[in-house]
Image (cartoon, helix red, strand yellow):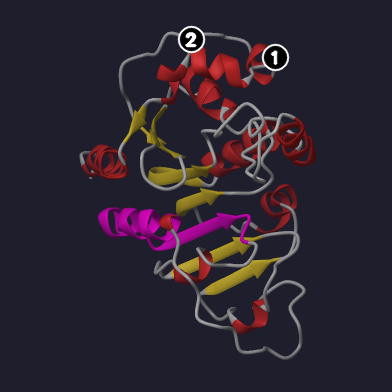
Amino acid sequence: MTDAAPAVATELPPPRPTHTTRRVNALAARLGARRYLEIGVQKGHTFRTVTIEQRVGVDPRFQFDTAAVANETTTLHAMTSDRFFAEAAGTRPFDIVFIDGLHVFEQVVRDLTNAVAWTGWDSAILIDDTIPIDVYSALPVQRDAIRMRQQAGGRGGQWHGDVFKIAFLIHDFFPFLDYRTIDGTDNPQTLCWRAQGPARTPVFNSLERISRLTWFDLQAHGEIMRKASEQDAIDLCAAAIGARR
């Protein structure tokens, strides 16, 4: 079943797998994941090609016919992620959560906090767009990013927002999470999981200061992103979770 779905389903073209599909399915195979949550589904290219048994998708405005996808093990909720966690998350935790909703720091903080509440020690959380490509891409308003890049003589509509700040938040305020930022292939994403590792020394130790960070601060403190290859990040996550089983 699905929320706000059309009465009659229309046939959809075959989905096109993404780099996120590859990463999520690799994690699922290593962790034995059975429940998957995706925040920010849009056209569903990733969601529809994830092979986890039970899938839950959340998006205020799906860009495909959800009735053609929904079934007993796949549910889609046409609502904000805030409303989903408040009203429709159910009672069972998720094994993997992919956060790709509104690309502004405040919303990602809420999505991550809620995701932590709805996952367990054997779960992984993947956050999209955590390394902006330039100073314009890191602006919190998409239209400003595109306009200012064009005014400076640049081209392209790339926009990551200020999602990168979430790595600084995890580093300083989520000591129970280990994390790596996948970089070098396809779109940068930050993978995090629960871990009892050595304590980290906060760098900023202030939510207000982190909220005001800029692209230039990211360049000055790039080590906080803890960059790793896709395979290394997945291996670290799987090893940490596997060691507890």
Residue 31 appears left or right of 142: left
Q: Are marks 2 and 1 in contact (CB under 8 Å)?
A: no
At x 72% / y 91%, what residue is drawn? 8
Q: Residues within 10 Å of mark 1 (few under 14, many from 20)?
A: few
If the image is split into quadrants, where does the C terminus sit? Answer: top left
Q: Position of residue 66 (x, y in %)?
A: 66, 76
- Secondary element at image label 1: helix
Above or below, 70 relative to 91: below
When asked about the image quadrant of residue 239, the answer is top left
Q: Amino acid at mark 1?
A: Glu
Q: Residues within 10 Å of mark 2 (few under 14, many from 20)?
A: some
Of residues 35 and 109, which is closer to you in this image? 109
**Which residues make up the magenta segment?**
20-41
Q: What residue sits right under mark 1 in the picture?
A: 208
Above or below, 217 relative to 96: above
Above or below, 123 relative to 90: above
At x 47% / y 45%, what residue is drawn? 187
Distance of mark 2 from mark 1, alpha carbons?
Answer: 14 Å
Q: Position of residue 109 (x, y in %)?
A: 63, 33
Residue 150 appears left or right of 179: right
